[in-house]
Image: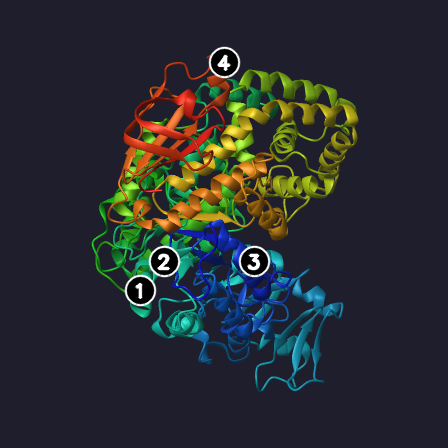
Amino acid sequence: MPAADAGSARAPIAATYRLQLRAEFDFDAAAAAAPRIAALGATHLYLSPILQAGPGSAHGYDVVDHSRVSADLGGPEGFARLARAARAEGLGIVVDVVPNHIAIPTPAWHNPVLWSVLRDGPGAPEARWFDVDWTAGDRALLMPVLGGPVGRCLRDGEITLDRDGTEPLVRYHEHAFPVRPGTEDLPLPALLDRQWYRLAHWRVADEELNYRRFFDVDTLAGVRVELPAVFAATHRVLLDLHARGDIDGFRIDHPDGLADPRGYLRRLAESTGGAWVVVEKILEGDEPLPGDWPCEGTTGYDALNRVMGVLVDPAGAEALTATWTDMGGAPPTFAEAAEAAKRQVLDGPLRAEVNRLVGIAAAICHADIMLRDHTRRALEEALVELLVAFPVYRAYVVPGEDPAPASRAHLREASALACDRVPERADEVDLLTELALARGHRDALRDEFCVRFQQTCGPVMAKGVEDTAFYRHMRLSALNEVGGDPGAFGIDPDRLHAWAHARQARHPVGMTSLTTHDTKRTEDVRARLVVLSEIAQEWREQVLAWHAAAAPLRQGDGPHPADEYLMWQTLVGAWPIGPERLWPYLEKAVREAKLRTAWTAPDHEYEASLRTLAEGVLADPALSGEVASFVARLAPATRANVLSQKLLQLALPGVVDVYQGTELVSLSLVDPDNRRPVDHEDRRVRMERLDAGAAPADLDDEKLLVTMRALRLRRAHPDWFAGADASYEALPSGSVHAVGMLRAGRVAAVTTRLPVGLERGGGWGTAGLALPEGDWRDVLTGRSVAGGVVPVEGVLDRMPVALLVREEDA
C-alpha cells in the first residue's frame, strides 16, 4: 500500500511515529524520512520538543527560549519545510511540549528570561515566571554552580568580573552571570553579595535551593505556567503553528509538576479549539486518569506494562525470587526497597523541597495560636512519613474545591500509614493531611502548601522509585519499567481485556506505547527477558554457573553479586552488545541505585571492579560464547514475544505510537542508548521488498511486516479501532497460550502467550478460535480462514501471530 497521494488531506490521528530531533537529525532529516514513515502506515509524525533548547542539547527538554523554534534544528524555516513535506505525504504533526520547566543554561545568557531575572531580581517583569522564594535568606536566587565553597573559589581567583563586553559579567569558568545595575564598582566579594543571585557550591542545592525545579535537576527551573501571561508567552509559538495548521496535537511532558494540571489542560483546550492532547502521566496500578482533565489520555505506559505483563509467566516468580535472593544477599522486597529509596532521596537530593514545605507549614502554625505548639522538627518528621507513604504520583486537590474521592482515599491511606510509623507525630500527620486536602479556612500559605505538597509527591515517586529502587531490585529487570511494579509478576489475559474495555470506554484515542525515550529498556529487550519467567530454574542454574566461571575476573571483594546479576540480565537482554554500550549503562545503573556508588559521590574503585568484570566477560571467548548460545536458545520464544507484544499494542484501543526504529527489532537500553541513529534507508528497502511479495527473511522483517500491515489497516479504517464503531471483545480460544481480540467485528488479532509452556505442553492441541461467521484473511500471510470455531494451530502455524480481516472489509 503506497503512501497517501501528495497534497491529500491528513488522516484522523491513528498512529504516530516518534522522532528524536537533534542537530544531527534536524527538521530536514525528518522531512526526508516522512515518505517512508507515511508508507509504514503512520498518520502523524510525533516530534520531540521543537523550541530553542540549551547549547548542544541532545533531547530538547532543556528549553531556554520559548519565543523561538530551535535554530539548531533548522529554525522556523526548517520546520515549515518539514510541515510541507509531511502534508505532501498525508501526515500530520504532534509535538512534545515542556510546560513545567525551563533550563538554566551555561552561559546563562542563552535564556533571556532568566538573564533578566538574574540581573533585576524580583522587580524584573519576568520574575513571576519562576517559583522563587524571594523571602529566603538574602533574597537571592541560588545558583549552585561552584565546584567548591564560594570563599575558596573567590580566594583562588576562579570567580572574576569581566568588564570587556557590552555589559559587565561575573564569570566562573564557562559560566557567566549579569551584574546588578549600580553594583559594578564594588570589590568582587561585596559585588557578589549584592546580586539577585547567590553563587554557591553545588552541594548547597540539596538543602537551600529556593526555586522549584524539575525533580532534583538544578539546571531545570520550574515555570509558573498557571499564570495566564506565562502560559501565553511560553505557548505562543506552538499555538501559532497549530492555528496555521502545521501542528495537529500535543504531548504534555510531566503534568504532575504543574500547580494546576487540570487548569493548564483547560487553557490549552480553549486555546486550540480542542486539539488532540495526551499527557505523560504515570498511573499506579489501577489508578484512573482524573476524569475532569480535558485530554485524550496518557502517553501509554499503562498499556506498555499490561501488554508486557500478559507475557510474563507467574509460575516463574518463586524461582526468580530465589535466584535474586541468592545473588542479592537476602535483598529487601520491592516495597521495602522503594520505601528506603524514598527516604534516601528526601534526606538527600530533595531535602530543599522538604525544607520549603516545612517552612510553609511552620509559618501556618505560627500564625494560628491553636497550632503554635507544632515544632519544625515534629512537622518535618510527619511530612517525611506522609511523603514516603503516599502511594501515587499526585493527589489532585484544588484549593477551594472539595477533593475527589480518590484524592481523599490516597491521602487518608498515607496518613494512616504515617501515623502507624510515627505515632508520636500523629497530630502533625493529621494537620498536614488536612492542609494537603485544603481543609478548613483558606489563605495564601495554606493554598501554597496544598499545591506544593502535590508538586513534591511526583519527584519523590520518580526519584525514589523509578530512578533509585528500580535500579536496586532486580528479580526480573524487564519489570522495572516506567509505570510498572516490579513487585507484581504478570497478569492474566482477562485483566488485559478488562483494561482494554475500560480504555475503549474512557480514552479510546489515548496513546499506547511499548518504547519511549524514557523507557529503561526497549520493548524487544523486555520481550527477551520475560522468557526467563518461563525457564526460571534453567536460568537460575545458568546464571549461577556464569557467576562461578567469572570468579577469576573479579577484583578483590567486588563487584557486589546484585550488580553482577543486573549485568548478566543486561547481557542476555541486549545481546549482542559491546563494552562501549554495556559499561555506560552499568555505570548509570549502579550510580542511580546509590548503594555502592553515586553520581554525587562516585566510588571509582568499586566502579572499576564492575567494569573489569563486564569487559572481562565480553573479552572471554568461553563466557561470551555461552551468553550467545543461551540467547540463541531463547530465540524461538523471543520471536513469539516480540511479535505478540507488537500486535497486541497495534490492536488495542488507542492511538499507536512507534518509537523511532522499533518497527524492526531494537535492543537498546535507557537514554542515551535509545537515541542512537536510525537507519531509515534500510527500513525503506525492507518495506519495498515485503510490499513486492517477498517472504520475511528474519525477525526484523517479520516485526516490520506486522507493524506496517497493522498500521495501514488502522489508517484505512480508523473507526474500527477508535471511532464509535470501535467495539472491543475478547476472542475466546480455549487456551491460556493465546490472547485474541475482535475489533468492530471486522478485525481479529491473535497472539501467542507463554511460548515455552506451549511447546512443553505439546502445542495447541484442540484449542480453537471462535471467529464470527464469514470469510477472513490473514493480512500477514495471505491465508484465508472460514468463520466459526477455527483451530488455533492452523492459524498460527506460520507465524506466532495473525491479523485477520473479514474478506468483504479488506
Q: Residues within 10 Å of mark 3 (few under 14, many from 20)?
A: many
Position in image of residue 499 (x %, y %): 32, 37
What residue sits 71% from the left and 64% below the top? 152
Mark 3–mark 2 Cα distance, whole angstroms, equals 24 Å
Inspect the image, locate mark 3, and give the three-letter code of the amino acid beneath it: Ala
Q: What's the mark number on residue 33?
A: 3
User: Given contact means CB atoms under 8 Å apart, are the residues at marks 2 and 1 in contact?
Assistant: yes
Q: Earlier in the sequence, mark 1 or mark 3?
A: 3
Name the element at disc 4: helix
What residue sits 54% from the left and 44% below the top? 692
Mark 4–mark 3 Cα distance, whole angstroms, equals 44 Å
Q: Earlier in the sequence, mark 4 or mark 1?
A: 1
Position in image of residue 790 (x %, y %): 34, 23
Q: Quadrant of residue 421?
A: top left
Inspect the image, locate mark 2, and give the three-letter code of the amino acid beneath it: Val
Q: Earlier in the sequence, mark 4 or mark 3?
A: 3
Q: What's the mark number on residue 760?
A: 4
What residue sits 50% from the left and 30% below the top? 641
Q: Tell me if residue 654 comes above or below residue 731 in the rendering.
A: below
Position in image of residue 94 (x %, y %): 43, 60
Inspect the image, locate mark 4, and give the three-letter code of the amino acid beneath it: Arg
Inspect the image, locate mark 1, and give the three-letter code of the amino acid beneath it: Ala
Name the element at disc 3: helix
Question: Between tags 4 and 1, which lies in front?
Answer: 4
Q: Quadrant of residue 795?
A: top left
Name the element at disc 2: strand
Q: Earlier in the sequence, mark 3 or mark 2?
A: 3
What residue did someone put label 1 on?
A: 269
User: Given contact means CB atoms under 8 Å apart, are the residues at marks 4 and 1 in contact?
Assistant: no
What residue did someone put label 2 on?
A: 277
Q: Residues within 10 Å of mark 2 (few under 14, many from 20)?
A: many
